[in-house]
Image (cartoon, rainbow, N blue to C red):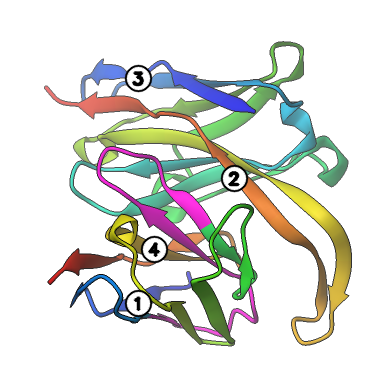
Amino acid sequence: EIVLTQSPATLSLSPGERATLSCRASHSISGHLAWYQQKPGQAPRLLITDASNRAAGIPDRFSGSGSGTDFTLTISSLDPDDFAVYYCQQRYIWWTFGQGTKVEIK
Amino acid sequence: VQLMESGGGLVRPGGSLRLSCVGSGFTLSHTLMTWVRQAPGKGLEWVGHIRSKTEGGTTDYAGPVRDRVTISRDDSRNTVFLQMHSLNVEDSALYYCTTETPGGRKYYDTSLGYSLYEYYSDYWGHGTLVTVSS
């Protein structure tokens, strides 16, 4: 089973700041990585597929990068609507999720 | 495109439950249909999925549930099912069904080494709550 480890667990930032979230895979997964955003009481929302492709309707302040075992989700300038939990997900061998990173208002 | 789950509820440890996910606005058999669960206050957990008809309709399951769940599809009802047996308290969660549809042009990414679409759109139901308790 491929394990995904996200860091940090919590990120405390102010609106307008840059957020950098990390996801590390236990084995190489090429570019088979997605990122999701989830707000309280809501279903997750797909942000990024294939490590760096934005999903439909996702603002360009969200970007993904990486390949192999190390991946990054960057939010260039935090909007008040972006404070949420973010999950990475590998799709290389079956699917697994990381444990999540909470982006909270500082 | 809409998805709606049903069938959740309270079940005793060791019991069984069948969850349903009805699709509208699209043909469910044309896409990969996935079940994801989330225990209260916890993260997301992939349960399993069933591939589209064109991809053979095969299924994959997560390790913790592999021997206890079956995902199936009824194309006449545009519905996917998650049948669960031998439920335990760790199976208590909100169960979502979800799918993605490709958009834009298909292209080959030389750095990734495979073909993909320009973008994908995801769709989720509201979830159905399963509580396993004596």
A38 part of magenta stretch: yes
Q: Name the residue under label 2.
A: B122
Classed neighbour count for the residue bearing mark 3: other residues with Cα under 10 Å, few (<14), some (14–19), many (≥20):
some
On the rendered image, what quadrant is the C terminus of chain A found in? bottom left
Identify which residue is drawn at 76% across, 26% down.
B27
Do the residues bearing badges 3 and 2 touch, measured as CB atoms within 8 Å? no
Residue A105: give x, y in percent of width and height.
Answer: 16, 66
Range of the magenta residues? A21-46
Between the C-alphas of marks 4 and 3, the distance is 25 Å
Label 1: state its secondary structure. Answer: strand
State the separation of the CA atoms marked 3 and 2.
Answer: 23 Å
The Cα–Cα distance between marks 4 and 2, rounded to whole angstroms, is 15 Å
Task: Name the secondary structure under disc 3.
Answer: loop
On the image, the x and y values in percent for residue B32 come to 69, 42
User: Does residue B106 appear left or right of residue B119 in this picture?
Assistant: right
Badge number at residue A17: none
